[in-house]
């Protein structure tokens, strides 16, 4: 099983990195590296995080976690874990 980031999630991660870099490039690297490391470790235990409470009609495959005030939503599929959303926790959640 592998971790795959959606284009949209990658774009949001890049935007977060750029924003944090304005204040501290070192912290920006730390935040991104930590979040990427967590997502790469998900295949070891993909169900360890709680169900995504914002996903309507969640069949149990949609999960989410928060780190550094960012909310990362992912879906556990048969052969991959797909990172579908990366959002700052101060933003209004989207229903999807």
Image (spheres, grey):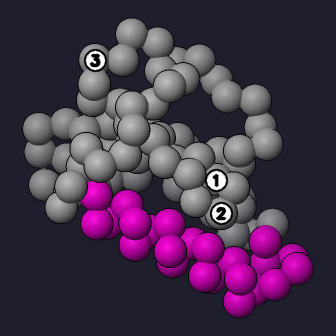
Per the image, label 3 sits on a secondary structure element best described as loop
Label 3 Cα crowd, 10 Å radius (few <14 / some 14-19 / many 20+): few
Q: Residue at x 71, y 48 (%)?
A: 88
In the picture, measured across the screen, residue 59 lies left or right of residue 84, that is left
Residue 2 within the segment the image draws in magenta:
no
Q: Please, is residue 77 above or below residue 23 in the view?
A: above
Q: Which residue is mark 1?
A: 70
Q: Which residue is mark 3?
A: 59
Q: Which residue is mark 2?
A: 68
Label 1 Cα crowd, 10 Å radius (few <14 / some 14-19 / many 20+): some
Q: Please, is residue 74 above or below residue 96 in the view?
A: below
Q: Which segment did they paint magenta?
A: 20-42
Q: Quadrant of the N terminus?
A: bottom left
Residue 2 badge: none
Q: Residue at x 47, y 21 (%)?
A: 55
* Towards the viewer: 47 or 25: 47
Quadrant of res 27: bottom right
Per the image, label 2 sits on a secondary structure element best described as loop
């Amino acid at each position: 099983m592998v971790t795959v980031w959606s284009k949209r999630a990658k774009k949001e991660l890049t935007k977060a990195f750029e924003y944090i870099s304005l204040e501290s490039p070192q912290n920006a690297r730390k935040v991104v590296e930590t979040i990427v490391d967590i997502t790469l470790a998900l295949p070891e235990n993909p169900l360890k995080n709680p169900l995504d409470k914002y996903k309507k009609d969640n069949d149990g495959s949609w999960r989410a976690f928060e780190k550094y005030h960012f909310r990362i939503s992912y879906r556990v599929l048969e052969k991959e874990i797909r990172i579908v959303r990366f959002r700052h926790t101060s933003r209004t959640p989207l229903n999807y």
